[in-house]
Amino acid sequence: MKLIRLLIATIFITSNSFAQLDLPPSGNNPRATISEEVGITSITIKYSRPDVNKREGKIYGDGNVVTYGFSTASFITNKNTSPWRAGANENTIITFEHDVKIEGQPLKAGTYGLFMAMGADNVTIIFSNQSDAWGSFNYDEKYDALRVNVKPVALDKSVEYLKYEFIEHKEKYCVIAMQWEKLSVPFKVEVDVDNIVLARLREQLTGRQGFTPALILTATQYCFTKNINLEEALVWSKKAIDGQGGQKTYITLRNLATAYEKLNRTAESDSTMNEALLIATANQYGAYGRILITQKRNDKAMEVFTAAQKRYGDIFGVNSGLMNGYSAKGDFKNAIKYAEKAMAQAPNDATKTTLQGQIAKLKEGKDIN
């Protein structure tokens, strides 16, 4: 009987040694997670937040809460070789969904322990492959993935609970800062957004999304907007028409024409648009004509506006297009003529107000485009 009780007790102790209780964080250091994306790259920081707790002026520096340099006693070397955990309790960890650059230095995608060796004028930020430790007592330099040096910045107001913030966010980079007491430690994270997005688009377009013309067009429009990857965008544009599930519509043909246009293949662009205009609405004629005006192809624009008139007659979309076309060519008399026709056919008061302003400008001999 005693043996059975002993076995039961052993099983109970062993099983519970692997169990974890759901308790508040130790030391009253709240857990926090902050995450943002640069492009489509997620950057996430998980950390615990110590407070100043009436220790302002005694947080940083030798003999204070966070001593300068590598001053925490190490369990491995028994020397002062461990940096600050840059938070409290468990490792502060930072995760990058894709490869990045930290202060100009490359760092692979992954999760890293985030440590700092503080200094009055310099902070060494360490990204360690040790990401599941408690504190930095077992920190080992051999697991470092990257070290960068940055300048700390003084803050005007004290931050009671340590926090991480994305203090600057641009299209292809962000700046993250650790802020506690009256000190901020910022570091820049750069992301190769375009190539990461293109890689993801290629992956998606080889899957189910590649059978949906609208999604293919979205991928091409990204390339057109950024003026990148134009040859492949041309291939995708053709696929939206001729590929499995492709459709020949005004939209897909206009997109293909844009691909040719971006590659300076004007003859092929015009030929594609001639086909597209066979199935275009009056408004689509007008929109294309106005694009031609922005390209300084005024004669071609007038051809398109005139073709719309022959096909659709005396309607608002046609007349407003002719107004723009004649104005671009400096024929303000005819521009006013068609502007007044469009005014009589305007679908709402807002459009009438816009046309009134355009007519007034035309009467002054000014181009409205």
Image (spheres, rainbow, N blue to C red):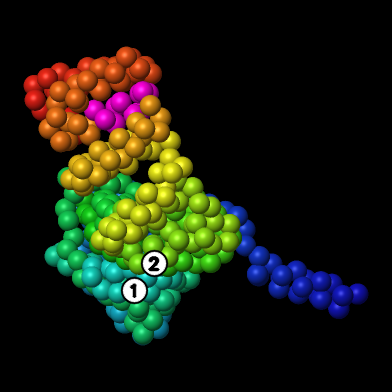
Counting labels gives: 2
Question: What type of secondary structure mainly makes up the magenta span?
Answer: helix
Stretch of the chain drawn in magenta = 314-323
First in sequence: mark 1 or mark 2? 1
SS at circle 2: helix
Q: Residue at x 23, y 70 (%)?
A: 104
x%, y% of residue 42? Answer: 42, 59
Point out the residue furthest to the right here. 1
Query: In the displayed structure, would residue 243 be above or below residue 317?
Result: below
Kindly indicate the quadrant of the structure image that contains residue 7: bottom right
**Residue drawn 30% across the image and 74% down it:** 106
Whether residue 292 is visible here, answered yes or no, is: yes
Would you name the residue on which mark 1 appears?
107
Quadrant of the drawing holding the N terminus: bottom right
Query: Rounded to the nearest whole Å, what is the CA distance between mark 1 and mark 2?
Result: 28 Å
Q: The residue under label 1 is which amino acid type?
A: Leu
Q: Bin the neighbour count of mark 2 within 10 Å (Cα to Cα): few under 14, some 14-19, many 20 and up.
A: some
**Snapshot quadrant of residue 322:** top left
Q: Kindly identify which residue carries mark 2.
A: 232
Q: Is residue 208 left or right of residue 356?
A: right
Image location of residue 144, percent across then percent down = 35, 79
The C terminus appears in which quarter of the rendering? top left
- Where disc 1 sits, the SS reads strand
Towards the viewer: 99 or 327: 327
Residue 174, can we see it? Answer: no
Residue at position x 34%, y 73% in the image: 107
